[in-house]
Image (cartoon, helix red, strand yellow):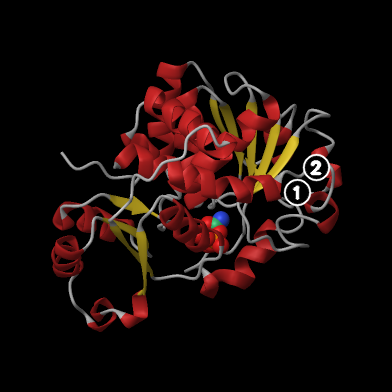
């Protein structure tokens, strides 16, 4: 059966640990894989990207494969060709598809009809590749995962959703601090709670950023205006700033050795201050580097 990478919820705790272990081996040079030799990977991007696009392209090249970058607006998809038709055609040419889409359901369609592994490079609902790199980063910095507390401050968006799923799968406690109306979706919180029951971790959703950050080992934030939310920009910024900004004062509530994470791109002065982003607790550049090692682990596991 073809295996896809659409959400971490499709992977067991053991499989996630295995992906992290593979990423560590790839990073240290212990594993040098050519798993994609002779294989072609199509990458459909409907939205801009720096980290995901480049780390995937480099990963595919270094694993011996060929990367075919396809801008969404240059495909017939943009002129109304159905996703399922695109999927069936691409599946006859290439060995795998990486896709960044507006609608998560389009990924589900690609997976259903292409017959080749499909990897979620971000959708409105999830960003699982990001969270794999994040878990790798947390493990590197904290030397463990279980029992730590991650505080996510800000919008209950795709990154927050995947953190909820990823953390609870591997036994990390997660507390989300979001303004009213911007909390993560109920169904996702329910999934996280059900995972947490199995892994023994805790999930909390609060409207107080101070409560969320209290004694946290990891303080994580993301943009207040995700790609696709541009029309709500003003209203969102008014709602989130200043209370939900990760700044020095908010960070005082966290554990003194807390690390600060951000999937990037960062908007200094909005979700995070320059001082914190560039400060000594910030691990954002290592986090960004780990995208490359994590992407390779995904290919090694899927192929
Ligand atoms: N973090 C992340 O996915 O960045 P890009 O949008 O640059 O790919
Ligand atoms: N939540 C952000 C993540 C960007 C990497 C977005 O979807 O735009």
The quadrant in which the N terminus is found is top left
Identify the residue at image location x=69%, y=48%.
Answer: 284
Read off the residue under disc 1: 246
Q: Residue 197, relative to residue 56: is it above or below?
A: above
Frontmost residue, 186 versus 86:
86
Left or right, 18 with respect to 147, comes to left
Read off the residue under disc 2: 250
- Asked if the residue at tag 1 contacts the one at tag 2, i.e. Cβ–Cβ closer than 8 Å, the answer is yes
Frontmost residue, 102 versus 128:
128
The quadrant in which the C terminus is found is top left
Q: Secondary structure at mark 1?
A: loop
Frontmost residue, 59 versus 281:
59
Left or right, 103 with respect to 142, comes to left
Can the viewer see residue 184 in this picture?
no
Residue 17: assigned label: none
Residue 63 place in picture, x, y as percent = 41, 50
Quadrant in the rendering for residue 75 = bottom left
Residue 258 place in picture, x, y as percent = 76, 32
Q: Secondary structure at mark 2?
A: helix
Label 1 CB, ligand 2: below 8 Å?
Answer: no
Residue 87 place in picture, x, y as percent = 19, 63
Can the viewer see residue 274 in this picture?
yes
């Amino acid at each position: 059966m073809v295996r896809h990478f659409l959400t971490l919820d499709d992977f067991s705790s053991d499989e996630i640990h295995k992906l992290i272990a593979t990423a560590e081996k790839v990073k240290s040079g212990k594993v040098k894989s050519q798993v994609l030799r002779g294989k072609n990977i199509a990458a459909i991007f409907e939205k801009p990207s720096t980290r995901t696009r480049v780390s995937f392209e480099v990963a595919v090249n270094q694993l011996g494969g060929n990367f075919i970058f396809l801008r969404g607006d240059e495909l017939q998809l943009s002129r109304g060709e159905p996703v399922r038709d695109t999927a069936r055609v691409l599946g006859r040419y290439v060995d795998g598809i990486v896709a960044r889409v507006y609608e998560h359901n389009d990924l589900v369609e690609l997976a259903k009809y292409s017959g080749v592994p499909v990897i979620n490079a971000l959708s409105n609902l999830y960003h699982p590749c990001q969270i794999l790199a994040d878990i790798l980063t947390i493990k590197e910095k904290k030397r463990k995962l279980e029992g730590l507390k991650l505080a996510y401050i800000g919008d209950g968006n795709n990154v927050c959703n995947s953190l909820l799923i990823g953390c609870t799968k591997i036994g990390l406690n997660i507390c989300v601090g979001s303004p009213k109306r911007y909390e993560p979706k109920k169904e996702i919180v329910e999934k996280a709670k059900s995972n947490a029951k199995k892994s023994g971790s805790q999930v909390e959703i609060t409207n107080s950023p101070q409560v969320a950050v209290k004694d946290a080992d990891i303080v994580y934030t993301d943009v207040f205006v995700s790609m696709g939310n541009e029309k709500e920009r003003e209203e969102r910024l008014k709602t989130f700033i200043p209370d939900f900004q990760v700044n020095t004062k908010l960070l005082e509530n966290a554990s003194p050795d807390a690390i600060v994470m951000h999937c990037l791109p960062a908007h200094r002065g909005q979700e995070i201050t320059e001082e914190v982003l560039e400060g000594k607790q910030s691990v954002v550049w290592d986090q960004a580097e780990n995208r490359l090692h994590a992407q390779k682990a995904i290919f090694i596991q899927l192929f």
